[in-house]
Amino acid sequence: MDTTTLIKFIEGRCDAEEIRAIQQWLEDPAHAQELSALLARHWAETSSDAGANVSSADRERLWHSLRSRINLPETLPEPVTTPETPMRRRFLPIWMQVAAAAAIIGIALFFYLPSDARQSDQPSQVIAEAPVTDITPPDQARATLTLADGRRIYLDSTASGILLSDPSLAVTRNDAGAIVYDAAAEASITFHTLSLPRGSRPMRLVLADGSAVWLNAASSITYPTGFRGAERVVSMTGEAYFEVAHDPGHPFIVEQGDLRVRVLGTHFNIRAYGDADRRQVTLLEGSVRVQRGSAQEMLRPGQQAELVPARLTIQSADTESVMAWKNGQFIYDGVDLQTIMQEISRYYDVDVHFRDEIPYQFVARISRDVPVSAFLEKLSLTGLVAFNIRLGRIEVNRP
């Protein structure tokens, strides 16, 4: 394959016939390695802007995913520098080369392969620059388990069974897809982090004390592999639902920034996404104490603590709407469109752009198993808003 065509592929400029030829050419592992080396060199000779927005948590996942699709080798070779390579770009760290190369291939695959080809390893017909007119819901939990030594286990490509085992600690994935910890009393304590990206189904985690946690998309939780001492402490971002094992002598503490939730044994939900201006703690069963700085409140079942930058307030909660994400539904009862579209963005892994301000609140109830077009159509029936899906991005307009 000539270098000119491969560069066109890297930059997303190939037509359908050229893409088919490259797919056939990549069936030879040696050719795949040649492409990866070319990617590294191409990145070293071009701007670093392509990799600037690739988050550190997604770099290894993206490369891992691309390797499984087009047979790239495990590691990207070091770029070959030449006298023409600008000095300021010659010594870029290898992760930045990988991130940019992965992003470039990902863009090419997204625009040139139909959706069924992106979800399957089987050869499929190639469509050149097919517009993305709908987005399907996630079909699995795309989680990453990060161990204390920095190793990562990608759970979307891991079957049920033993994930980690030593004489005092076992971590398994059961047949229902939950991650389960079993630690001996004498086990040394380390910390693990379970993370879900945008576009993921929720995942269940069972901690060493038997407490269960359901994690929503675009969320993470950091926790010890076993519990010792006076308190059981975990930290989180995003949204999680907890069913805490009762242990009066060892309160369970959830920390999120300056928010601290203290419980003994109870069921509650915490919603604390970084892209929202408010955090919410909703109690379903038992009692919790919510604290931020010197302000603290005790919640009763059916109550919700809401934290905005200047205050902590208590109100009655619509627990059905709060728990809809865990129960496979979208339920909104008088919710502004900005909040709704933030959730759509996280669940379907799609960017949202508001072309017009929509100053209304909406009521909706629909399954999370539908493509995004079905959800948007339901909102459009109000006559208050219109949507377009262009190249995988949702545009929000006045009708």
Image (cartoon, helix red, strand yellow):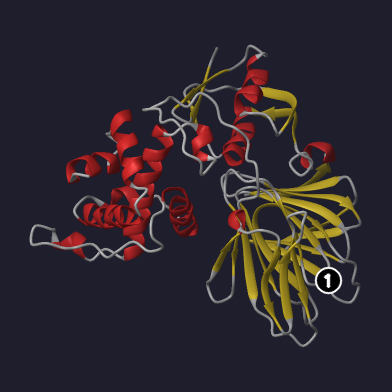
- Horizontally, residue 396 falls left or right of residue 142, namely left
Q: Residue at x 52, y 72 (%)?
A: 150
Instruction: Name the element at disc 1.
Output: loop
* The C terminus: image quadrant: top right
Q: Residue at x 57, y 37 (%)?
A: 345
As rendered, which of 303 and 45 lies closer to the eye? 45
- Horizontally, residue 47 falls left or right of residue 55, namely left
| Occupied quadrant, residue 205 | bottom right
- Whether residue 351 is visible here, answered yes or no, is no
Q: How many marks?
A: 1
- Pointer 1: residues within 10 angstroms few (<14), some, or many (20+)? some
Q: Residue at x 41, y 62 (%)?
A: 74
* The N terminus: image quadrant: top left
As rendered, which of 381 and 26 lies closer to the eye? 26
- Compared to 296, does 110 lie above or below? above
Residue under label 1, please give it.
251
Q: Amino acid at mark 1?
A: Pro
View extreme (left): residue? 83
Q: Position of residue 97 (x, y in %)?
A: 31, 58
- Whether residue 268 is visible here, answered yes or no, is yes
- Compared to 395, does 122 lie above or below? below
- Compared to 396, does 115 lie above or below? below
Q: Position of residue 298 (x, y in %)?
A: 85, 57
- Horizontally, residue 392 falls left or right of residue 186, namely left
View extreme (bottom): residue? 186
Q: Position of residue 187 (x, y in %)?
A: 73, 85
Q: Position of residue 278 (x, y in %)?
A: 65, 45
- Compared to 85, does 309 lie above or below? above
- Horizontally, residue 63 falls left or right of residue 288, namely left
